[in-house]
Amino acid sequence: MKKQIAVIELASNELRLKIGEKSDMKVKTVDSLSYPVTLGRESFHNGKISFETIEKICQVIKGFLNTASEYGVSEIRAIATTAIREAKNKDYILDQIKVKTGVDIEVLDENSEKTTVNRHIMSVLSAEKRNSALFVQLGSGNINIYVMENSKMVDTYSLKIGGLRINELFEESLDSPKDYVQVIREYLTPFFETLSDAIPEKLSQCIVSGNEIQTIASMCNATNSLDFSIMERTAFTKMYKKAKEKGTEAISMEYDIPQEEVEVLLPSLIVLNRLLKYTVNDSILLSNVLLSDAVMFEMLFPKEASFVVKAYEEFTLQSATSIAERFGRDLNHISRVSSVALEIYDKMKKLHGYKLRERTLLQVSAILQDIGKYVNVKNHALLSYNTITNLDIVGINDHERLIIATVCYYHNGNIPSMDSPIYNQLSQEDRVMVSKLAAILQISNAINTSHSPKFEQVNVNMKNGKLNIYLTTLKNINLEKWAFIAKSKLFREVYGLNATIIKRGVL
Protein backbone atom coordinates (compact mmCIF):
# COMPACT_ATOMS: atom_id res chain seq x y z
CA MET A 1 0.00 0.00 0.00
CA LYS A 2 1.29 3.45 -0.91
CA LYS A 3 2.30 5.83 1.86
CA GLN A 4 -0.47 8.35 2.47
CA ILE A 5 0.02 11.68 4.19
CA ALA A 6 -2.33 14.48 5.19
CA VAL A 7 -2.28 18.25 5.52
CA ILE A 8 -4.68 20.10 7.79
CA GLU A 9 -4.88 23.80 6.95
CA LEU A 10 -6.49 26.47 9.10
CA ALA A 11 -7.20 29.07 6.41
CA SER A 12 -8.98 32.38 6.88
CA ASN A 13 -12.42 31.25 5.75
CA GLU A 14 -12.36 27.47 6.05
CA LEU A 15 -10.61 24.47 7.56
CA ARG A 16 -9.21 22.00 5.04
CA LEU A 17 -8.04 18.42 5.06
CA LYS A 18 -6.18 17.02 2.09
CA ILE A 19 -4.93 13.43 1.92
CA GLY A 20 -2.39 12.52 -0.74
CA GLU A 21 0.00 9.89 -2.01
CA LYS A 22 2.75 9.53 -4.61
CA SER A 23 1.79 9.05 -8.23
CA ASP A 24 4.93 8.96 -10.39
CA MET A 25 6.55 12.32 -9.58
CA LYS A 26 3.28 14.04 -8.72
CA VAL A 27 1.06 14.26 -5.67
CA LYS A 28 -2.23 12.44 -6.13
CA THR A 29 -5.06 13.79 -3.98
CA VAL A 30 -6.87 10.82 -2.44
CA ASP A 31 -9.47 12.82 -0.54
CA SER A 32 -10.15 16.40 0.48
CA LEU A 33 -12.60 17.92 2.93
CA SER A 34 -13.39 21.49 3.92
CA TYR A 35 -15.47 23.16 6.59
CA PRO A 36 -16.42 26.87 6.53
CA VAL A 37 -15.36 28.92 9.56
CA THR A 38 -15.19 32.62 10.43
CA LEU A 39 -11.52 32.77 11.43
CA GLY A 40 -10.66 35.63 9.11
CA ARG A 41 -13.80 37.64 9.82
CA GLU A 42 -13.15 37.45 13.57
CA SER A 43 -9.40 37.98 13.41
CA PHE A 44 -9.45 40.88 10.92
CA HIS A 45 -12.51 42.58 12.46
CA ASN A 46 -12.08 41.95 16.20
CA GLY A 47 -8.40 41.14 16.45
CA LYS A 48 -9.27 37.92 18.26
CA ILE A 49 -10.94 34.58 17.60
CA SER A 50 -13.75 33.60 19.97
CA PHE A 51 -13.61 30.52 22.17
CA GLU A 52 -16.83 29.33 20.54
CA THR A 53 -15.02 29.29 17.21
CA ILE A 54 -11.99 27.63 18.79
CA GLU A 55 -14.25 24.87 20.10
CA LYS A 56 -15.70 24.42 16.61
CA ILE A 57 -12.16 24.24 15.17
CA CYS A 58 -11.26 21.49 17.63
CA GLN A 59 -14.35 19.46 16.72
CA VAL A 60 -13.60 19.75 13.00
CA ILE A 61 -9.95 18.78 13.52
CA LYS A 62 -11.05 15.70 15.47
CA GLY A 63 -13.24 14.76 12.51
CA PHE A 64 -10.31 15.28 10.14
CA LEU A 65 -8.14 13.04 12.33
CA ASN A 66 -10.77 10.29 12.21
CA THR A 67 -10.89 10.51 8.41
CA ALA A 68 -7.11 10.39 8.18
CA SER A 69 -7.06 7.37 10.47
CA GLU A 70 -9.56 5.54 8.24
CA TYR A 71 -7.15 6.00 5.33
CA GLY A 72 -4.22 4.74 7.38
CA VAL A 73 -2.40 8.07 7.08
CA SER A 74 1.11 7.79 8.52
CA GLU A 75 2.05 11.48 8.72
CA ILE A 76 0.02 14.64 9.31
CA ARG A 77 1.19 18.23 9.11
CA ALA A 78 -1.12 20.94 10.44
CA ILE A 79 -0.56 24.54 9.33
CA ALA A 80 -2.23 27.89 9.92
CA THR A 81 -1.97 31.10 7.93
CA THR A 82 -2.99 34.76 8.16
CA ALA A 83 -6.08 34.64 10.39
CA ILE A 84 -4.40 32.66 13.19
CA ARG A 85 -1.08 34.46 12.68
CA GLU A 86 -2.64 37.88 13.24
CA ALA A 87 -5.00 36.93 16.08
CA LYS A 88 -4.02 38.61 19.36
CA ASN A 89 -5.00 35.46 21.25
CA LYS A 90 -2.98 33.18 18.95
CA ASP A 91 -1.10 31.51 21.82
CA TYR A 92 -4.33 30.55 23.59
CA ILE A 93 -5.83 29.22 20.36
CA LEU A 94 -2.84 26.97 19.69
CA ASP A 95 -2.81 25.78 23.29
CA GLN A 96 -6.50 24.83 23.24
CA ILE A 97 -6.13 22.97 19.95
CA LYS A 98 -3.14 21.05 21.33
CA VAL A 99 -4.91 20.19 24.59
CA LYS A 100 -8.20 19.14 22.98
CA THR A 101 -6.95 17.40 19.82
CA GLY A 102 -3.29 16.58 20.43
CA VAL A 103 -2.37 18.43 17.22
CA ASP A 104 0.51 20.90 17.08
CA ILE A 105 -0.37 23.69 14.67
CA GLU A 106 2.53 25.23 12.75
CA VAL A 107 1.78 28.90 12.15
CA LEU A 108 3.55 29.88 8.94
CA ASP A 109 4.96 33.36 8.88
CA GLU A 110 3.99 35.51 5.93
CA ASN A 111 7.19 34.91 3.97
CA SER A 112 7.23 31.15 4.56
CA GLU A 113 3.64 30.88 3.35
CA LYS A 114 4.17 32.73 0.09
CA THR A 115 7.59 31.17 -0.55
CA THR A 116 6.27 27.62 -0.16
CA VAL A 117 3.70 28.23 -2.90
CA ASN A 118 5.82 30.35 -5.22
CA ARG A 119 8.87 28.11 -5.38
CA HIS A 120 6.61 25.17 -6.25
CA ILE A 121 5.02 27.20 -9.05
CA MET A 122 8.43 28.29 -10.30
CA SER A 123 9.62 24.68 -10.42
CA VAL A 124 6.95 23.76 -13.00
CA LEU A 125 7.05 27.02 -14.98
CA SER A 126 9.14 27.28 -18.13
CA ALA A 127 11.98 29.81 -18.27
CA GLU A 128 10.22 31.56 -21.15
CA LYS A 129 7.07 32.15 -19.10
CA ARG A 130 8.96 33.66 -16.17
CA ASN A 131 11.33 35.87 -18.18
CA SER A 132 9.13 38.94 -17.72
CA ALA A 133 6.33 38.18 -15.31
CA LEU A 134 4.10 39.34 -12.49
CA PHE A 135 3.29 36.62 -9.95
CA VAL A 136 0.17 37.27 -7.89
CA GLN A 137 -0.96 35.22 -4.90
CA LEU A 138 -4.56 36.04 -4.00
CA GLY A 139 -5.12 35.37 -0.31
CA SER A 140 -8.00 36.06 2.03
CA GLY A 141 -5.86 38.34 4.18
CA ASN A 142 -2.92 39.33 1.99
CA ILE A 143 -2.00 39.74 -1.66
CA ASN A 144 1.57 38.67 -2.43
CA ILE A 145 3.32 39.95 -5.54
CA TYR A 146 6.60 39.00 -7.22
CA VAL A 147 8.16 40.91 -10.10
CA MET A 148 10.51 39.20 -12.56
CA GLU A 149 12.48 41.04 -15.23
CA ASN A 150 15.03 39.38 -17.54
CA SER A 151 14.44 36.11 -15.67
CA LYS A 152 15.55 37.74 -12.41
CA MET A 153 13.46 38.23 -9.29
CA VAL A 154 13.72 41.97 -8.72
CA ASP A 155 10.95 42.76 -6.24
CA THR A 156 8.43 41.25 -3.88
CA TYR A 157 5.53 42.85 -2.02
CA SER A 158 3.09 41.63 0.58
CA LEU A 159 0.01 43.83 0.81
CA LYS A 160 -2.74 43.53 3.40
CA ILE A 161 -5.49 43.81 0.80
CA GLY A 162 -6.80 40.24 0.62
CA GLY A 163 -10.43 39.71 -0.38
CA LEU A 164 -11.80 38.78 3.05
CA ARG A 165 -9.89 41.58 4.80
CA ILE A 166 -11.22 44.21 2.37
CA ASN A 167 -14.72 42.80 2.58
CA GLU A 168 -14.61 43.16 6.37
CA LEU A 169 -13.61 46.80 5.99
CA PHE A 170 -16.29 47.83 3.52
CA GLU A 171 -19.14 45.33 3.81
CA GLU A 172 -21.57 48.12 4.72
CA SER A 173 -21.28 49.29 1.09
CA LEU A 174 -22.37 45.91 -0.32
CA ASP A 175 -25.96 47.02 -0.88
CA SER A 176 -24.77 49.32 -3.65
CA PRO A 177 -22.46 47.46 -6.08
CA LYS A 178 -21.30 50.71 -7.68
CA ASP A 179 -20.41 52.34 -4.34
CA TYR A 180 -18.74 49.14 -3.09
CA VAL A 181 -16.44 48.89 -6.10
CA GLN A 182 -15.68 52.62 -6.07
CA VAL A 183 -14.71 52.77 -2.39
CA ILE A 184 -12.45 49.73 -2.74
CA ARG A 185 -10.77 51.14 -5.84
CA GLU A 186 -10.09 54.41 -4.01
CA TYR A 187 -8.79 52.53 -0.96
CA LEU A 188 -6.37 50.55 -3.16
CA THR A 189 -4.98 53.60 -5.00
CA PRO A 190 -1.98 54.19 -2.66
CA PHE A 191 -0.95 50.54 -2.92
CA PHE A 192 -0.92 50.65 -6.69
CA GLU A 193 0.90 53.98 -6.81
CA THR A 194 3.75 52.24 -4.97
CA LEU A 195 3.69 49.38 -7.47
CA SER A 196 3.63 51.74 -10.43
CA ASP A 197 6.88 53.31 -9.24
CA ALA A 198 8.47 49.85 -9.00
CA ILE A 199 7.19 48.61 -12.37
CA PRO A 200 7.94 51.40 -14.86
CA GLU A 201 7.50 49.14 -17.90
CA LYS A 202 4.82 46.57 -18.55
CA LEU A 203 5.65 42.91 -17.97
CA SER A 204 4.69 40.14 -20.36
CA GLN A 205 3.09 37.38 -18.33
CA CYS A 206 0.75 37.34 -15.34
CA ILE A 207 0.68 34.18 -13.22
CA VAL A 208 -2.02 34.04 -10.55
CA SER A 209 -2.47 31.58 -7.68
CA GLY A 210 -4.74 31.29 -4.64
CA ASN A 211 -7.70 29.43 -3.22
CA GLU A 212 -10.15 31.39 -5.40
CA ILE A 213 -8.43 30.47 -8.66
CA GLN A 214 -10.66 27.50 -9.51
CA THR A 215 -13.74 29.70 -9.09
CA ILE A 216 -12.27 32.45 -11.29
CA ALA A 217 -11.23 29.87 -13.90
CA SER A 218 -14.75 28.45 -13.99
CA MET A 219 -16.38 31.90 -14.28
CA CYS A 220 -14.11 32.76 -17.23
CA ASN A 221 -14.27 29.35 -18.96
CA ALA A 222 -10.51 28.99 -18.65
CA THR A 223 -8.80 26.10 -20.44
CA ASN A 224 -7.58 23.61 -17.86
CA SER A 225 -4.24 21.76 -17.90
CA LEU A 226 -2.14 19.87 -15.36
CA ASP A 227 -0.32 22.72 -13.64
CA PHE A 228 -2.07 25.81 -15.02
CA SER A 229 -5.38 26.96 -16.41
CA ILE A 230 -5.24 29.50 -19.23
CA MET A 231 -7.65 32.44 -18.91
CA GLU A 232 -8.15 34.89 -21.73
CA ARG A 233 -7.89 38.54 -20.74
CA THR A 234 -11.04 39.40 -22.68
CA ALA A 235 -13.00 36.73 -20.80
CA PHE A 236 -11.85 38.08 -17.45
CA THR A 237 -12.64 41.68 -18.44
CA LYS A 238 -16.16 40.66 -19.50
CA MET A 239 -16.76 38.71 -16.29
CA TYR A 240 -15.33 41.48 -14.10
CA LYS A 241 -17.52 44.13 -15.71
CA LYS A 242 -20.57 41.99 -15.05
CA ALA A 243 -19.54 41.28 -11.44
CA LYS A 244 -18.94 44.91 -10.48
CA GLU A 245 -22.23 46.08 -12.02
CA LYS A 246 -24.60 43.35 -10.85
CA GLY A 247 -23.48 42.89 -7.24
CA THR A 248 -22.90 39.82 -5.14
CA GLU A 249 -26.43 38.40 -5.01
CA ALA A 250 -26.91 38.41 -8.79
CA ILE A 251 -23.45 36.95 -9.39
CA SER A 252 -24.12 34.26 -6.81
CA MET A 253 -27.26 33.19 -8.66
CA GLU A 254 -25.79 33.41 -12.17
CA TYR A 255 -22.64 31.40 -11.42
CA ASP A 256 -24.13 29.17 -8.70
CA ILE A 257 -21.60 30.30 -6.09
CA PRO A 258 -22.52 30.81 -2.41
CA GLN A 259 -23.07 34.52 -1.76
CA GLU A 260 -20.58 34.58 1.14
CA GLU A 261 -17.93 33.30 -1.25
CA VAL A 262 -18.79 35.97 -3.83
CA GLU A 263 -18.52 38.71 -1.18
CA VAL A 264 -14.89 37.68 -0.61
CA LEU A 265 -14.23 37.05 -4.29
CA LEU A 266 -15.33 40.48 -5.57
CA PRO A 267 -12.54 42.45 -3.81
CA SER A 268 -10.02 39.95 -5.20
CA LEU A 269 -11.38 40.54 -8.70
CA ILE A 270 -11.01 44.30 -8.23
CA VAL A 271 -7.37 43.82 -7.17
CA LEU A 272 -6.63 41.39 -10.00
CA ASN A 273 -8.21 43.67 -12.60
CA ARG A 274 -5.89 46.48 -11.50
CA LEU A 275 -2.80 44.24 -11.43
CA LEU A 276 -3.44 43.01 -14.97
CA LYS A 277 -2.73 46.55 -16.18
CA TYR A 278 0.95 45.87 -15.45
CA THR A 279 1.08 43.03 -18.01
CA VAL A 280 0.44 42.75 -21.75
CA ASN A 281 -0.15 39.09 -22.68
CA ASP A 282 -3.66 38.23 -23.81
CA SER A 283 -3.57 35.00 -21.78
CA ILE A 284 -3.24 34.81 -17.99
CA LEU A 285 -1.87 31.68 -16.31
CA LEU A 286 -3.88 30.48 -13.33
CA SER A 287 -1.85 28.15 -11.13
CA ASN A 288 -3.64 25.09 -9.77
CA VAL A 289 -1.09 24.80 -6.94
CA LEU A 290 -2.44 25.53 -3.46
CA LEU A 291 -0.47 25.82 -0.23
CA SER A 292 -1.56 22.34 0.83
CA ASP A 293 -0.36 20.91 -2.51
CA ALA A 294 3.09 22.43 -2.08
CA VAL A 295 3.31 21.18 1.52
CA MET A 296 2.30 17.65 0.49
CA PHE A 297 4.95 17.64 -2.23
CA GLU A 298 7.59 18.51 0.37
CA MET A 299 6.33 15.69 2.61
CA LEU A 300 6.18 13.01 -0.10
CA PHE A 301 9.24 14.03 -2.12
CA PRO A 302 11.75 15.46 0.39
CA LYS A 303 14.78 14.89 -1.87
CA GLU A 304 13.18 16.53 -4.89
CA ALA A 305 11.81 19.32 -2.68
CA SER A 306 15.33 20.05 -1.43
CA PHE A 307 16.41 20.56 -5.05
CA VAL A 308 13.51 22.99 -5.54
CA VAL A 309 14.55 24.89 -2.40
CA LYS A 310 18.16 25.04 -3.58
CA ALA A 311 17.19 26.29 -7.05
CA TYR A 312 14.98 28.96 -5.49
CA GLU A 313 17.93 30.36 -3.53
CA GLU A 314 19.11 31.98 -6.75
CA PHE A 315 15.96 34.14 -6.64
CA THR A 316 16.79 35.05 -3.04
CA LEU A 317 20.20 36.35 -4.10
CA GLN A 318 18.66 38.21 -7.05
CA SER A 319 16.14 39.85 -4.72
CA ALA A 320 18.84 40.91 -2.24
CA THR A 321 21.01 42.29 -5.05
CA SER A 322 18.07 44.26 -6.45
CA ILE A 323 17.48 45.77 -3.00
CA ALA A 324 21.15 46.70 -2.64
CA GLU A 325 21.11 48.36 -6.06
CA ARG A 326 17.98 50.29 -5.12
CA PHE A 327 19.85 51.57 -2.04
CA GLY A 328 22.74 52.79 -4.19
CA ARG A 329 25.28 50.13 -3.22
CA ASP A 330 28.40 49.31 -5.26
CA LEU A 331 27.63 45.87 -6.73
CA ASN A 332 31.27 45.25 -7.67
CA HIS A 333 32.36 45.81 -4.07
CA ILE A 334 29.54 43.57 -2.86
CA SER A 335 30.70 40.83 -5.24
CA ARG A 336 34.27 41.01 -3.92
CA VAL A 337 33.22 40.89 -0.26
CA SER A 338 30.79 38.02 -0.93
CA SER A 339 33.41 36.03 -2.82
CA VAL A 340 35.93 36.23 0.04
CA ALA A 341 33.29 35.52 2.70
CA LEU A 342 32.04 32.42 0.88
CA GLU A 343 35.54 31.06 0.31
CA ILE A 344 36.33 31.43 4.02
CA TYR A 345 32.98 29.83 4.90
CA ASP A 346 33.64 26.85 2.63
CA LYS A 347 37.15 26.29 3.99
CA MET A 348 35.83 26.30 7.57
CA LYS A 349 32.95 23.82 7.24
CA LYS A 350 34.26 21.57 9.99
CA LEU A 351 34.63 24.49 12.38
CA HIS A 352 31.35 26.32 11.95
CA GLY A 353 29.25 23.18 11.35
CA TYR A 354 26.72 24.90 9.11
CA LYS A 355 25.30 23.91 5.74
CA LEU A 356 24.16 25.52 2.50
CA ARG A 357 21.23 27.46 3.98
CA GLU A 358 23.45 29.32 6.44
CA ARG A 359 25.84 29.98 3.56
CA THR A 360 23.00 31.75 1.76
CA LEU A 361 22.26 33.82 4.88
CA LEU A 362 25.92 34.90 4.96
CA GLN A 363 25.81 35.83 1.28
CA VAL A 364 22.62 37.87 1.69
CA SER A 365 24.21 39.62 4.69
CA ALA A 366 27.24 40.52 2.57
CA ILE A 367 24.94 41.96 -0.08
CA LEU A 368 22.77 44.05 2.28
CA GLN A 369 25.20 45.06 5.04
CA ASP A 370 25.70 48.66 3.90
CA ILE A 371 22.21 49.66 2.77
CA GLY A 372 21.91 51.91 5.84
CA LYS A 373 24.47 54.24 4.23
CA TYR A 374 21.72 55.30 1.82
CA VAL A 375 20.12 57.10 4.78
CA ASN A 376 23.20 58.21 6.69
CA VAL A 377 26.82 57.06 6.80
CA LYS A 378 26.91 57.77 10.53
CA ASN A 379 25.73 54.76 12.54
CA HIS A 380 24.80 53.04 9.28
CA ALA A 381 24.99 49.55 10.83
CA LEU A 382 21.96 50.30 13.00
CA LEU A 383 20.18 51.85 10.04
CA SER A 384 20.91 48.72 7.99
CA TYR A 385 19.52 46.57 10.81
CA ASN A 386 16.31 48.58 11.09
CA THR A 387 15.81 48.62 7.33
CA ILE A 388 16.43 44.90 6.82
CA THR A 389 14.01 43.88 9.57
CA ASN A 390 11.28 45.59 7.55
CA LEU A 391 12.24 44.28 4.10
CA ASP A 392 10.60 41.61 1.98
CA ILE A 393 13.42 39.41 0.66
CA VAL A 394 12.34 36.63 -1.68
CA GLY A 395 12.65 33.22 -0.04
CA ILE A 396 13.68 34.55 3.39
CA ASN A 397 11.37 33.92 6.34
CA ASP A 398 10.97 36.20 9.37
CA HIS A 399 13.46 34.28 11.51
CA GLU A 400 16.13 34.26 8.81
CA ARG A 401 15.57 37.95 8.13
CA LEU A 402 16.33 38.75 11.77
CA ILE A 403 19.53 36.67 11.59
CA ILE A 404 20.63 38.57 8.46
CA ALA A 405 19.80 41.95 10.00
CA THR A 406 21.80 41.17 13.13
CA VAL A 407 24.81 39.90 11.17
CA CYS A 408 24.71 43.17 9.22
CA TYR A 409 24.53 45.12 12.48
CA TYR A 410 27.86 43.56 13.50
CA HIS A 411 29.54 43.62 10.08
CA ASN A 412 31.77 46.59 10.82
CA GLY A 413 34.00 45.19 13.58
CA ASN A 414 31.88 45.46 16.72
CA ILE A 415 31.89 42.54 19.17
CA PRO A 416 28.42 41.11 19.96
CA SER A 417 27.49 41.53 23.61
CA MET A 418 24.63 40.43 25.85
CA ASP A 419 24.38 44.09 26.87
CA SER A 420 22.92 44.80 23.43
CA PRO A 421 19.12 44.31 23.18
CA ILE A 422 19.58 43.49 19.49
CA TYR A 423 21.84 40.54 20.35
CA ASN A 424 20.20 39.58 23.64
CA GLN A 425 16.76 39.09 22.09
CA LEU A 426 18.06 36.12 20.08
CA SER A 427 18.05 32.53 21.24
CA GLN A 428 21.37 31.01 22.33
CA GLU A 429 21.58 29.07 19.07
CA ASP A 430 20.92 32.17 16.99
CA ARG A 431 23.43 34.27 18.93
CA VAL A 432 26.14 31.73 18.13
CA MET A 433 25.16 31.71 14.45
CA VAL A 434 25.19 35.51 14.24
CA SER A 435 28.64 35.64 15.84
CA LYS A 436 30.07 32.97 13.55
CA LEU A 437 28.73 34.57 10.38
CA ALA A 438 29.57 38.12 11.48
CA ALA A 439 33.16 37.05 12.28
CA ILE A 440 33.62 35.82 8.71
CA LEU A 441 31.96 38.92 7.26
CA GLN A 442 34.13 41.26 9.34
CA ILE A 443 37.43 39.90 8.03
CA SER A 444 36.03 39.78 4.48
CA ASN A 445 35.25 43.48 4.81
CA ALA A 446 38.74 44.16 6.16
CA ILE A 447 40.30 42.61 3.06
CA ASN A 448 38.11 44.83 0.87
CA THR A 449 38.38 47.94 3.05
CA SER A 450 39.64 50.12 0.19
CA HIS A 451 36.52 49.37 -1.89
CA SER A 452 38.76 48.91 -4.92
CA PRO A 453 39.80 45.83 -6.95
CA LYS A 454 43.35 45.59 -5.58
CA PHE A 455 43.81 41.83 -5.79
CA GLU A 456 44.32 39.57 -8.76
CA GLN A 457 43.34 36.61 -6.63
CA VAL A 458 42.31 35.76 -3.05
CA ASN A 459 43.03 32.24 -1.77
CA VAL A 460 42.21 30.75 1.60
CA ASN A 461 43.54 27.72 3.43
CA MET A 462 43.56 26.22 6.90
CA LYS A 463 46.96 25.09 8.13
CA ASN A 464 48.29 24.25 11.60
CA GLY A 465 45.26 25.74 13.30
CA LYS A 466 45.51 29.04 11.44
CA LEU A 467 43.41 30.63 8.71
CA ASN A 468 45.72 31.94 6.00
CA ILE A 469 44.39 34.38 3.42
CA TYR A 470 46.70 34.96 0.44
CA LEU A 471 46.28 38.20 -1.49
CA THR A 472 47.85 38.21 -4.95
CA THR A 473 48.73 41.79 -5.86
CA LEU A 474 51.52 44.23 -6.68
CA LYS A 475 49.82 46.99 -4.70
CA ASN A 476 50.42 48.15 -1.15
CA ILE A 477 48.23 46.33 1.43
CA ASN A 478 49.08 48.33 4.57
CA LEU A 479 45.50 49.60 4.82
CA GLU A 480 44.15 46.05 4.63
CA LYS A 481 46.61 44.87 7.29
CA TRP A 482 45.52 47.65 9.63
CA ALA A 483 41.82 46.90 9.05
CA PHE A 484 42.39 43.16 9.41
CA ILE A 485 43.98 43.54 12.85
CA ALA A 486 40.99 45.59 14.01
CA LYS A 487 38.35 43.30 12.50
CA SER A 488 39.76 39.86 13.30
CA LYS A 489 39.14 40.06 17.06
CA LEU A 490 35.67 38.53 16.84
CA PHE A 491 37.01 35.76 14.62
CA ARG A 492 39.57 34.76 17.26
CA GLU A 493 36.98 34.99 20.01
CA VAL A 494 34.41 32.84 18.20
CA TYR A 495 36.60 30.24 16.49
CA GLY A 496 39.67 30.25 18.74
CA LEU A 497 41.86 30.70 15.66
CA ASN A 498 44.33 33.24 14.45
CA ALA A 499 43.74 34.60 10.97
CA THR A 500 46.37 36.30 8.89
CA ILE A 501 46.69 37.90 5.46
CA ILE A 502 49.74 37.19 3.33
CA LYS A 503 50.74 39.15 0.26
CA ARG A 504 51.76 37.26 -2.87
CA GLY A 505 53.38 38.82 -5.90
CA VAL A 506 51.83 38.52 -9.35
CA LEU A 507 53.62 35.91 -11.47
Image: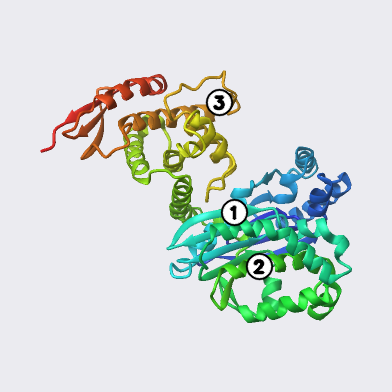
Disc 3 versus disc 2: nearer the observer:
2
Where 206 falls versus 325 (above or below)?
A: below
Q: Which amino acid does the dot numbered 2 rest on?
A: Arg
Where 121 falls versus 408 (above or below)?
A: below
169 or 121: nearer the eye? 169
Question: Residue 28: x, y in percent?
Answer: 59, 66
- What residue is at 65 percent from the left and 66 percent from the top? 30
Label number found at residue 157: 1
Q: For mark 3, what is the residue? A: 423
494 horizontally vs 184: left or right: left
167 horizontally vs 309: left or right: right
- What residue is at 55 percent from the left and 64 percent from the top? 134
Disc 2 versus disc 1: nearer the observer:
2
User: What element does badge 3 sit on?
Assistant: helix
Answer with mark 3 or mark 2, whichever residue precedes in sequence.
2
Quadrant for residue 218, please give it: bottom right
Quadrant for residue 12, please give it: bottom right
Residues at discs 2 and 1 in contact (Cβ within 8 Å) = no
337 or 342: nearer the eye? 337
